Amino acid sequence: MAYNVLICDDEKDIVSALKIYLSSENYNTFEAYTGKEALEIIEKHDIHLVLLDIMMPEMDGLTAMVKLREKYNIPVILLTAKSEDTDKILGLNIGADDYITKPFNPMEVIARVKSQLRRYMKLGGAAVKPSVLTSGNIELDDRSKTVTVDGEPVNLTPKEYEILKLLMENPGQVFSPRDIYRRVWNDNPYGSEGTVAVHIRHLREKLEINPAEPRYLKVVWGQGYKIERGEKR
Amino acid sequence: MNRIIHSLAFKVTAIFLFVITVLVFIAGIIGIAVFYHYDYYVTSVENVKKEVFENITREYANSVYYRYFFSGIYEYNNPTDALPVPSSNFLFTLKNQEGEIIFSNYSGEDYKFSWIFEFNEAVYTAYSEENTYETYTMECYVKNPLDTDDYYFVMDRLVDFTYKMKYSIIVISILAMAASIILFIVLMCSAGRRKGIEGVMPNGIDKIPFDLLLGIIVIFFVFEALIFEEMRYFDIIGYIISLSIFAIVDILLLLLICMSFATRYKLGGWWRNTVIYRILSFFGRIFKKTADLIKYFFRNRSLVTRAILILTGIMILEFAGLCISYDQEGLLVFLWIIEKLLLGSVIILVAISLQKLKLGGQKIAMGDLNYKVDTRYMFWDFKDHGENLNRINEGMARAVEERLRSERFKTELITNVSHDIKTPLTSIINYVDLIKKENIENEKLKEYISVLDRQSARLKKLTEDLVEASKASTGNLPVNLAPTEIGVLFTQAAGEYEERIKNSGLELILNKPTEEIYIMADGRLLWRVFDNLLNNICKYAQPGTRVYLDLEKINGQAVITFRNISRYALNIPSDELLERFVRGDRSRNTEGSGLGLSIAKSLTELQNGSLELYIDGDLFKVILRFNVIDMAVPMAAF
């Protein structure tokens, strides 16, 4: 089934570029250039995901999103030139599902669109199995020793798997590299806890769409690592 | 309302009514005084009459007695003729010491009152030095009922009439007083106002100096009193009429003065139009001119000249004092004490001023731009100097504020501009990417596209760094300081950069103590410092060399050192490298914005740390210093 994606940005070139990328992934695209147009299109068509710019004439993206959220539950990814943390937090708090700052890497946009759609369309109401640890869209099944992200299986080495399991069993808790070494390697580190950092980096590259800005596996600089206590949608 | 009050007709009427009410009031007061004198308020009407009649009768009796003795009995065949005023109600019987009737017009009529008066007559005898007295008695009667045509009758009616009025006169007086006060207030309000004209219009009288006007009126009153003195010889009717006329004129004059004063008061500065003020202000001006001249003379001498002049003056005064009092010890001591007290207080004032100026100078030197030197009690050059200091401070404060504002404006400008750049840049990056995906055979074109790709990535990095640099340098960034273990950060940073360092052909060597070292820092910002520095190392270090990352605890400070061998000859001073947009290679051909070190320095300083740069030949060294904090073994117990 081809999903309908609405692209809304006042910059026509960006809209057409995104359209090319999304079409090449077999998505049906709709275009809007103001918040108002976006709302009108959502009323008329069965849209599955919205890419929404914030700074637009007539009605800005945040206002449009608040209006949209009154009726619809579809994923919204904000696209914006504003890169301050406060802007991101504001956007996510008032109902955005994800946030991409300009200038963006088109591949990242595609990956995030895919991720959101998978979650929205396929994993919507899946029941949680007891042997399965979840955090956000990451699932770790301890019986089959498999890990999936947005339903897609991910290949992990045994140590990476052990580290992820340790963190997911204690969501929100910060583990220092030394703790992780002791718990996973069952040995005293004696200066070899540097390996932990390398494993974590690899793990992040496998789990996250943009490893430089991780959504789940977070680095607490100067303290350690943790998995976000993300809620399942 | 105002229209009516200000009309001339109203004013004239009001003045007329005012005069009448005041006259009524005065008359009422006199009446009350008279009534009080005759005991109207404590006795009956008969008693009053008795007292009045007694006075009249005594006068008549005296008159009859003296006329009898001095004019001789023989002239008056009819006793009634002996009365000074014809009166049919006055009856008398004059008896001598032996009780014989010698003179009488009483023949047994009914009488209302009777009195007996005694008269002592000196008798001169030849054989005695002392006078002997003969006593005559006169029995006097007032007829009942009274005949109609004499003084008794008039007084009887008058007392009857006035006795009835004894209370109403008080009411009338009070009413007259109230009315006159109200009229007075209304007249004061309307003084100087004219119908149809806004504001206060003085008339001719209001232009006469006020004290002159008062003087004229006082002279008039004195003159009036003199005339009054003459008038005592007039008869009673003329006396009353002239008294009334004087009273009316006086009331009018006083009213005129009051209204004129009211007009002047409304105009403001009533004291200016007086002779005294004019004279005083004339002398005041002369005095001020002289003082100004002296001041001018002094002001234009130099400080040294002034000091000499003042000291000379003091010496002359001292010498004069000595000359006056050289032979009087008491006076000498007294003058000496006075002089020392005066001089001492001046010197103390000077010392206080100097102290304040010194303090102000210190504060300004230390950068307290809000400090103001208190120049209230200073004088001459001290005041000037203090005010100059204040002006310097104001100027500096303004300059600093302007600088801050321009910095803020710059940050805002940079943020806005980079936001605007990002949108077209997104299109460029996307379309370059799209072109890359097309099947291009042409090798040249492929090469060109890879240049576009690389340069657009660089532009992207540059815009991001620009915003960050401007924010970091102005402190426009939220900083959340928390205890941070640098050892862990070392491990994490090494993990993150392990691959890139290897790819750059470098070897990373970590040196850190086994003990945990905690500092107060914002982990995210500190990571960005490490990120920038390690990024620089990957870009600019000579491949095949070692990179050292050391952590030491020296004098309570955590000292972090990054050391590497530069790929390019570092031919610029280290402090210049910290400037924005400066890079080790001047050709600027390599990737990067030239902002990395500047951002790292700003971020370190935001976390109360310091960043120093050392260049020794090709050795490139960055040293970060933070204050170590004590942590009682947290989390390490795992």
Image (cartoon, coloured by chain):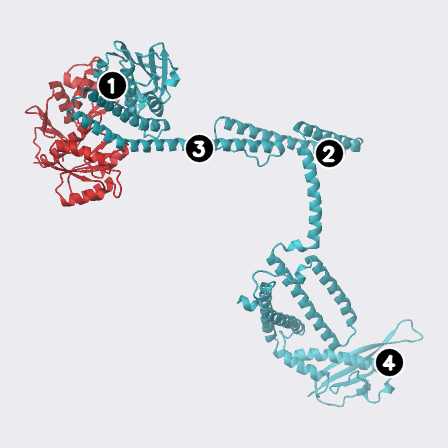
Chain colours: A red, B cyan
Which badge, 2 or 1, is on the more N-terminal residue? 2
Say if B80 sits above or below A4 in the image: below
Q: How many marks?
A: 4
Residue carrying label 4: B70
Say if A225 sits above or below A80 in the image: above
Residue at point 37% right, 21% down?
Answer: B579
Residue carrying label 3: B402
What whole-number distance in Å separates the C-alpha atoms at marks 4 and 1? 150 Å
Q: Are marks 4 and 3 in contact (CB under 8 Å)?
A: no
Residue carrying label 1: B493
What whole-number distance in Å separates the C-alpha atoms at marks 2 and 3? 60 Å
Residue carrying label 2: B334
- List x then y, in percent, for residue A138: 13, 29
* Quadrant of residue B478 within the rendered picture: top left
Disc 1 crowd, CA 10 A, few/some/many (<14, 14-19, 20+): many
Which badge, 2 or 4, is on the more N-terminal residue? 4
Give the label, 2 or 1, closer to the camera: 1
What whole-number distance in Å separates the C-alpha atoms at marks 2 and 1? 88 Å
Question: Quick one: SS at disc 2?
Answer: helix
Q: Label 2 sits on what residue type? A: Phe
